[in-house]
Amino acid sequence: MSVPAVPCAPAGVVGCEPEVLAATAVVYYLRNRRKQRNFIMANVTGAGHLHFHAENLPKDGTGCPGTWMFEAAWDYFFRDQKVVIRGVRGDWTSGDNLDAVNRLTVGGAMSLEEACKRTWTYRRAKSKGFSRYQYIDARGGPGQYVSVDVVFLP
Amino acid sequence: MIHLRNDVVQMLRRMARRGERPSVMLRAVIEEVGQEEADRPLLFLYFSTAFCFTEGQGYKIFGWFPDGTGALQDSGIDALLSGRIQETRAEWDRPVSENIELDLHLSS
C-alpha cells in the first residue's frame, strides 16, 4: 500500500508538525507531533458520509488549525482516494460545536437545526457544497445536549 | 505507524460477548497496550475494528477520558456505545478465521 504524502504545515502557523499515522480507503488519521491534543481522525462511512473528530487543545494559538486538518482529510479522500462523498457528519459529545449548539438553543431560542447550521462543522460542510441538514440522533434537550449527531447533505 | 494487535481486538470481542460495559472495555485496552500508547484515537481504532463500525459509531469515544475528565462519564459512554456494539454483532461475532481485518498498518 502506498503511503500518502504528509501535507505541508500551513504557513505562518506555530507548532504544527503533521504526521499521518493511518491512511486507508476509509480511515485517515493525522496528528501533530508537537502537540498531544491536536489531531484529526476521519473516515468515510458506508453511506458515504465524511465523519471526523478534530482537536487542537489547549487553545493557545499554536498547532495545526482545525480547518487545515479538515482540508487535509478532505483532500485525502476526495482527491487522492477518489471517494464519492455524499455528506458531512456532525457528531458531537463535546467541543466547540456542541457548546455552540447548547448556547444557541437555551430556552428554545433556536431550533436544533438552526443551531447546527451555525457550527464550525457546518461551515466546513457548506464550503464543500453540503448545506442541507438531516437529523440522526440527539441526547439531552435544548441548552443541555450531551450528544448531537446530524449530517449535512448536498 | 499504527499496529493494531489482534489479541486486543479479540479481547474486546470476548468482553462484549460477556456483556461487559464499554467503559470497562476501554480501560482494558488501556491496561493492555499501556497508558502512553492508548490515546483516544487508538481506542477509537480498536473499537471500530473490533466491532466492525463502518458508520462512525465509535466517535463517541472522543468525549471520554479514563480519568473522568471528559464530557462523557462512564455511564454516558456506556449508554452511547452498548447498543451500537450489539447492533453490529452479526458482523463481529463470527469465527476468528472469518473476520480479521487489521489493515491499519501504515505510514509515519
Image (cartoon, rainbow, N blue to C red):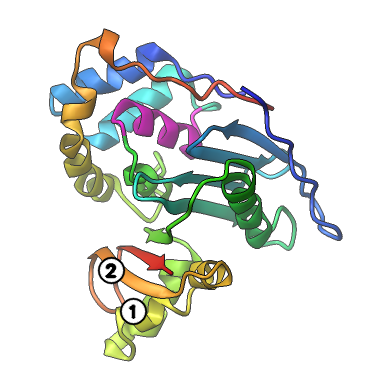
Q: Which residue is mark 2?
A: A135
Q: What's drawn in magenta, residue-wise?
A: B38-52
Q: Disc 2 marks which amino acid?
A: Tyr
Q: Chain of mark 2?
A: A
Dot 1 falls on a residue whose secondary structure is helix
Q: Residue at x 22, y 47 (%)?
A: B75
Picture quarter containing residue A56?
bottom right
Q: Disc 1 marks which amino acid?
A: Glu
Q: Is residue A95 left or right of residue B6?
A: right
Picture quarter containing residue B5?
top left
Local crowd size for mark 1, using a 10 Å CA cut-off: few (<14), some (14–19), many (≥20): some
Residue B20 shows in this picture: no
- List x then y, in percent, for residue A153: 40, 67
Q: Which residue is mark 1?
A: A113
Q: Chain of mark 1?
A: A
User: Is residue B91 shown above or below B11?
Assistant: below
Local crowd size for mark 2, using a 10 Å CA cut-off: few (<14), some (14–19), many (≥20): some
Mark 1 or mark 2: name the one nearer the start of the chain.
1
Chief SS of the magenta region: helix
